[in-house]
Every structure is written in structure tokens, then in C-alpha cells.
Image (cartoon, rainbow, N blue to C red):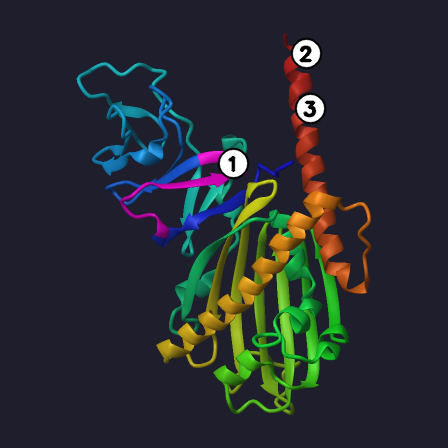
Amino acid sequence: MFIRNNWYIAAWADELVQAPLPRTILGEALVLYRDKSGAVGALEDRCCHRGTPLRFGEVVDGGLQCGYHGLVFDCAGSCVSIPGQAKIPAKARVRSYPLVEKDGFVWIWMGDAGEADASAILDYPFHNDRAKWPHKHTVYHIDAGYKLMIDNLMDMTHLAYVHKSTIGGSNAKIHVEAQMKVTPKETGLHYLRWMLACEPPPTYRKAVPQLQQVDRWQEFEFIAPSSIVQWSGALNVGMGAQQNRDQPGGFSLRLFHGLTPETENSCHYFWSTCNGYRQDEPEATEQLFNEIAAAFSEDKAIVQAQQAMLDATGEDRLVDIVSDSARIHMRRTLHRLQDQERAIGAEASDHATDHR
């Protein structure tokens, strides 16, 4: 079951140019586009005339034109033009979805449009501060459910096993024995990990060669149902990292992870890297992105293989261990939201039955 009454990332803002962008979200085939005025729209990928996918169309004055018989639809889904016909039938429309463009993202609401509150969309100001946080972003298609990808981000002990040559390093002990505090929140959870007096991993050394023994942190906030904000870094021992992480001379990056369900067993992974150390060197931002991309490609391979195995064998024989504490709370939060949405749906169904 998908959690529909919530905001998900539909696209990066710079993905939407003149060409329509097809994308399946929460099991629904959509087409995203930017009209001639710069407004963004999300429509059902199905023309109301003959059912032709609108992704075969093009953006014209007035909206998105169907590539079969030329009907034009605006961002609200209304047909505004029919070739050779002055009168437009009232039923000539397609379903549209609320969109909000903010902080480099295009957010979509897949549930009851009347419940869509743009103020509930999280703030991510780092994308707007290129002087302090130059960044680069992309999107991966993942053949695994979004929950498995979030699981991966809730348990950082995997770094020393999966990412030895990049962000993990080869010392599994420092990851397993990290000081960790998990704080449940109404909207998700926050956790902070400290690895003190340890060797920096290869990615950190490439970025900041003067690093020696470091105090290293990993801070994550999960905002249900599918966004994770991360701040990770390291300062040389003796610089007082635990008292003040925001100081020059060390390694620092911010990562955004957005997992948007495509189907039950596939998702879109929107992520960005923000460089917080050599901000005036574009090559440093590029190098950081490439290092993180290599690590995330490793995650992708592991999680896709995990999904295939679970599809074949089920989840009933899985066990939890100590490092699953954040993951377990994350899953409980998602189950609570699903239960709430299921209850609201049942109440609405009962109300409709009473008025028949």
C-alpha cells in the first residue's frame, strides 16, 4: 500500500524543459512538463480522446499537445484546444496532480488534491546557497522498493563492507562501535553517529589531504515517507568537532536522498551532493559527486539483489539486530501513516455507504 496523501519528489526542476517527461509514480503513469510560461504540470499520461499516451506529444502555446490528434491540455488538465473544433466538451480533460517547485525539486501530491498543503514540504536551503554549498545532483532508477533503499540509509554499519574504497574505509569496527543516538519524531526520526579518533576513509582523504586522525560524524534526519537529509564530515582530533562541527579545515558534505515509489518493487532515487570544504573549486565538487556516485552504485547493486531475493523467498525469516534501531523506528512510522490513511479511506467509504 502506498502512502498517497503526502508530498513526493516527481523530478529535478532542471529535468523539465520543453520535452514532456514520462514517469510512473505510485503505480500511476504520468507525464510531466514545463509550459511556455515556465509553469510545471503533471498529467495522467493518457489523452481523453483516444487514450494515446501524452508522452508522445509536445509542448506548444497553451500547454501539452497530444501527438495523435493535436488536442492541447493545460497544467490543470483542461483541454484548451481541439483542431478543427471551436466548442470543447466539458468532459475533455485529463487528471492533473498538484505540483510545487521548490529548492531545485518538483514535488507532487498523489492523493486527495484538497489535502495538498505546500507548507508541509520540507525546506532544503542548501541548494540555494551555491557559495557555501556548491552541489550536483541526479536521479537513479532502482529495481527495488523504496523502503529497502531507506533501510540502507538507516543502518550505516554497512559502509565498511560495501564502500571500502570510498566513504566507508576498511575498518568495520569503528562503524559497528560508533556512538549513536536515535531520536524519534512525529514526522520520522533523527540520528547522530560519532566515530572518534579514527582514520578518514578514502573519499575524505582525497577531498582534504591534510586529514589525519579524525573525529567523524554522520547525522541523518528521516522525514516520512521518503526523504532523508544527511550531514556528514570529519575534523582532525583536537579541533573540538563534538562541540562545533561547522568550522573550516575538515571534510563536510550534505546529502539529500529522495526515494519516490514507482511500483511496489521499484523506485526513483533523487540525490544530491553539496560540497562543504573546497567550495571555490568546481573540480572538488565534481570529484565528490563521482565518489558518492560510485558508492551509491554499490548500494544500488546490493539492494536490487536483496529485492530479488526477498521476492523469491519472502521476509518471514529475517531477523533484527542492534544496528537496526533507526530502521525499525522508520518502518513503524511508515506503518503508522499507512494505518492512518487506511482508516481515513474506510471512514470515507462508510460515509458514502450511509448516504446511498
Q: Quick check: 1 above or below 250?
A: above
Extreme-left residue of the structure:
84
SS at badge 2 = helix
Q: Where is residue 334 in the image (x, y as percent from the top left)?
A: 68, 45
The stretch of residues the image draws in magenta is 15-29
Q: Quick check: 238 above or below 242?
A: below
Q: Distance between the residues labelled 3 and 2?
A: 11 Å
How crowded pointer 3 is (Cα within 10 Å; few <14, some 14-19, many 20+) is rated as few
Q: Which amino acid does label 3 sit on?
A: Glu
Q: Where is residue 74 in the image (x, y as percent from the top left)?
A: 31, 31
Q: Residue 60: which numbered mark, if any?
A: none
Comparing 70 with 314, the one in front is 314
Q: In which quarter of the image is the N terminus?
A: top right
How crowded pointer 2 is (Cα within 10 Å; few <14, some 14-19, many 20+) is rated as few
- The residue tagged 3 is 347
Q: Where is residue 46 in the image (x, y as percent from the top left)?
A: 39, 27
- The residue tagged 1 is 110
